[in-house]
Each structure stands twice: as C-alpha cells, then as structure tokens.
Image: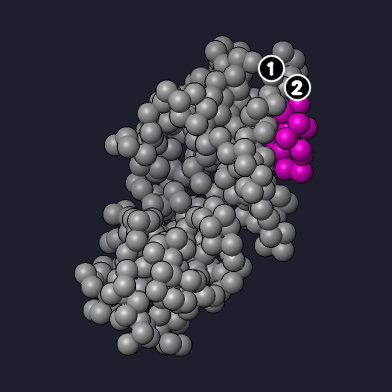
Amino acid sequence: MIRVFRTGAHAHRTPLSYSALAPLFSDEITHTQRPDQADIYVFAHSLDIENAPLELVEDWRQRQRPIVLLSEEPFWDTIWGRQPLARRRTIDSRYGLLPVYQLNHCTSSIFRFTKIPYYLLTNHRFANAYTARLKRNCELSEQDWQNAFASRPTRLSFMFERRPEPFHSISWPEAGLAGLCNWRTKVAEHCRAGPIKCFGRSWNGASPDRRQLYDWHLDKLALLDNHQQTLMAFENTHHPEYITEKIFDAFACGALPAYWAAPEHRLHEFGLPEGSWLNLHGLTPTEAATRLDGLAWDSPSWVRDFCAAYTAAQHRLAALLCNPSHWLHERQRLKTTLLAELIEILDGN
C-alpha cells in the first residue's frame, strides 16, 4: 500500500482524485491526512508546490520523501510550469527549493491512451453522454444530415476562454507541444460569416461560470446540440496525446468540428474520414478564419460529400465510445501505468 499525501488548490485534478477513478487504486493507494504519514507527496500544479505548506517542507527535509507533480493539464505545465519536458526539476517554494519528479504528457506514459483519451475517463458522464447521443446520431442517414445542417440556426459557434495575450503562444516543437489559446482567440475574432454564436463570460460577460454548475458538460451539450453547422473544438494546448471532450462534443452535438492537429497527433489514429472534420493546423489565425468563413454550405455537392463522410464518422465514434470494454480496458491501463510510475520513483528514492 502506497501512502499518498495530496494538497494544494488543484489537488482535485489528478488521476488519484476523481471519484470515477478512485476505485481503481483503492487496494494499492491510501490517502493520508498529514505529510509525515506519507510515502510520497503528490501535487497537481506547479503553483501548488510553490505554495506548499510549511509542514510538508519540514517533513521533506527530515525524511526526504519524493515530491511528485502529477499533472494532467499541459496548459498548466507550459504557462506556469515552464519546464514541461523535464522528468526531474526543482521548484522554488516559499520555503526554499524542492526537488520534484514531474509526471505529465511529455515525461510519462500515464496519459498515453490506447483507445479512450485520458480526460474522458475522469467522469462517467462522458461515457453516458456520448453513448446516448452517438447512438441517436447513428440512426440518421446521409440525407437526414443534409437536412439537419440546412436547418441549423447558427453557422459557427465556439465555447472557450478569450485569451488574447501573446504569452499563450508558447511552444516546444521537439515534443509537439504548443499553446493554442492566443491562436484560437484570434481565429474567433477574425471570423465574419455568420450567424456566429460565442459562449462564455470572457466573451459576453453574461454567462454563468460553468465550473459552478452541477454538470457543466450536460449544460454544454444542451446549449450546443443541433445548434450550429460548425463548432470550434480547439484545445487550449496541442500535444499528440492530449485530447479532451471538445472534438467528441462537436460530433455528439451534430456539428462539423474545427480542430488543430499536427500530423503526429493521435486523433489521426481514430480512423475518422478526412472530410468529416476540419483540420486547421499550420494556418495563421487569418487563414483559419478565412477557411471557416468560406465553407461551402450553399454547395449541394460539397454538403453531400461532407455528410457522407460525417455519417461514417458517427458510426466510427459510436464503435469506439459506446463499447464498455474499451472504457474498462483504458481504466485498467491507467491504473497499471500510474502505479508503475509511482513505484519506480519510490524504489529510486
């Protein structure tokens, strides 16, 4: 049994924290209330280590137990952590420098999924929502989709934070790691062909904070379902292994997803027909906006070809996400890999 002490403002955002994943580790990991009871200290964000409590730092000085930054979020690793490729590093806390083992998308195999991307495992609502909507979508024919897209009230929608600051354009090309927040914000600001609908307080100031909702994902799907022809589904950060709910939500809601995926990105492994989603990788914000504005929704031949590819994509995603064995296998893989990483750190300490 590995005794783990978790602390910090982001402690609820690790693979060890979610109620959907906790049962995986119940026989191998126990969580302690004090650092001096732990074999290992686990943080989710570099900021939490910078603000580590004095009792933890004092205990580390006495017992030298490993400090682990177990980060599921490349956005945090790049904008705040600034050293996303380092397996071992030091972080300057309020009480002095601390040596840290960093387990993230770049330094660990924890997030290297086989079928289901990691983030979808963190709450059962994703599997439930996709199963219901994809099965519904698979009942539609190519002609049904043509009729559906013709009746959409909005041409383009997006739901992400407005982050125009240049410092978001950060990258480590050797790892396929790049910040997209500045880029996607500029794309949204450059689009002109409407109707365009933006969601989120950072754009209109009137929307509630989705993080305070009981089920923000259900609220998102309800807002977007059958609403727009194209949905911007860009991640906040590009990494080959990092795929959140965004592109799956677009397909589930019956929208053409606009995404950003380099050739090495693992979305290409899903076998989605090329014409079923829009890849804007390599384009400037102005070029990407022009591409979105120029989609030929008024061309019967283009719409026909798109809907054929889109119908096939719905069936492909249903085969992947509506199969419970895929979710069970992926959770088992996550358990095995994460435990192996922690044991390796403990054995080497």
**Residue visible at 64% across and 29% down in the picture:** 188
Magenta region: 272-290
State the image coordinates of residue 198 (x, y, percent, origin top left). Answer: 54, 24
Mark in the foreground, 2 or 1? 1
- Is 216 above or below relative to 102? above
- Is 158 above or below relative to 69? above
- Is 262 above or below relative to 272? below
**Quick one: quadrant of the C terminus?**
bottom left
Question: Which is nearer the N-term, disc 2 or disc 1?
Answer: 1
The residue tagged 1 is 193
Q: How many marks?
A: 2
Tell me the colour scheme of the image.
Answer: one colour
The three-letter amino acid code for the residue at tag 1 is Ala
The circle drawn on residue 294 is 2
Helix, strand or loop under label 2: loop
**Residue visible at 42% across and 23% down in the picture:** 206
The three-letter amino acid code for the residue at tag 2 is Gly
Question: Is residue 132 magenta-colored?
Answer: no
